[in-house]
Image: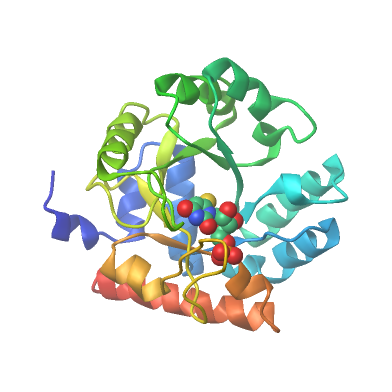
Amino acid sequence: MPSSTAVQNLTFEKRAQLSQHPLAKKLFQLMASKKSNLALAADVTKASELLDLANSVGPYLCVLKTHIDIIDDFTPEITRELRKAAEKHNFLLFEDRKFADIGNTVLQQYQGGIYKISEWAHLTNAHPLPGPGIIEGLQKVGKPKGNGLLLLAQLSSQGTLIDAGYTRKTVDLALRYPEFVIGFICQEKLTDNPALIHMTPGVQLASKGDDLGQQYNTPHHAIFEKGSDIAIVGRGIFQHANPLESAKEYRQASWEAYQKKAKL
Ligand code: S5P
């Protein structure tokens, strides 16, 4: 395994070549071609707002992250429209479901119910807390569809119960499922394995946090200083007076931090 510095310097193009999972390959390739390592956390509550964001900001994103269960006027049509926007603007859809139950239950939550997450979301995530069964349950549904899973290895919130040992065990678990787990939700680079993608929420330029425990860092901190790959930005973009201009600013800041890290 190359040294940590050498891995840090690998470009997204190179990491696309080194990835075995088709979705990880696709994500690295589209980040390189769109020059974007920005994910939008589109936490709006109206279907029209979500679709407007997907179509206006979509060209500047690598990933659009949803909380589909906060949409007040949900219909299955929304997920079809999201998928169309993802194809048109070349980004991946990530449903931030944070599964956390036993394998048999998460399998049903992922494939069924109203939201049928596995049918439209390229990516979803899970807390590894229950152990390997949660990954195996989700994998049964998601792997045949070519979907990928991110494990929550760290959280951005103040007072999180996750400690260093839990994070280390999460990385070990991810390495056991290379055909389904493509990376982490985390606050820093956790492994030298170039195929695994690090996505970091809790990113904002204008604020240090909210009044419910969220903690923010800048894109430069998350990507250059902490070695993550993708910055996830929510309210910093969609609550801005001009979401499109704000998205362009976060995209530029995140991309410059990546370029500096990769010494491009
Ligand atoms: O540790 C975490 C993990 C996640 S996925 N901290 C987070 O904030 N998130 C999600 O990222 C959260 O659910 C929300 O959708 C987004 C952050 O939104 P923001 O408005 O605070 O930027």
Q: In this view, does 27 lie above or below 232?
A: above
Q: Residue at coordinates 46% horizontally, 61% vertically from top-left?
A: 31
Residue 173 vertical placement versus 39 (above, below): above
Q: Quadrant of the C terminus?
A: bottom left
Q: Nearer the viewer, residue 207 or 58?
A: 207
The image's colouring method is rainbow
Q: Is residue 57 above or below residue 197?
A: below
Rendering quadrant holding ligand 1: bottom right
How many numbered discs?
Answer: 0
Q: Quadrant of residue 179?
A: top left
Q: Residue at x 35, y 67 (%)?
A: 223
Q: In this view, does 212 lie to the left or right of 49?
A: left
Residue 252, horizontal then vertical, whole percent = 47, 79
Q: Nearer the viewer, residue 247 or 239?
A: 239
Residue at image coords 55%, 69%: 210
**The N terminus - image quarter:** top left
Q: Can residue 63 be seen in this view?
A: no
Q: Can residue 133 be seen in this view?
A: yes
Give the x, y percent position of residue 79: 77, 45
Which residue is at the front of the view, 184 or 23? 184
Q: Position of residue 184 (x, y in %)?
A: 40, 45
Q: Which residue is drawn at 46% across and 19% down?
A: 133
For residue 104, side relative to residue 190 (left or right) = right
- Give whichever of 82, 74 is nearer the camera: 74
Q: Position of residue 102 (x, y in %)?
A: 53, 20
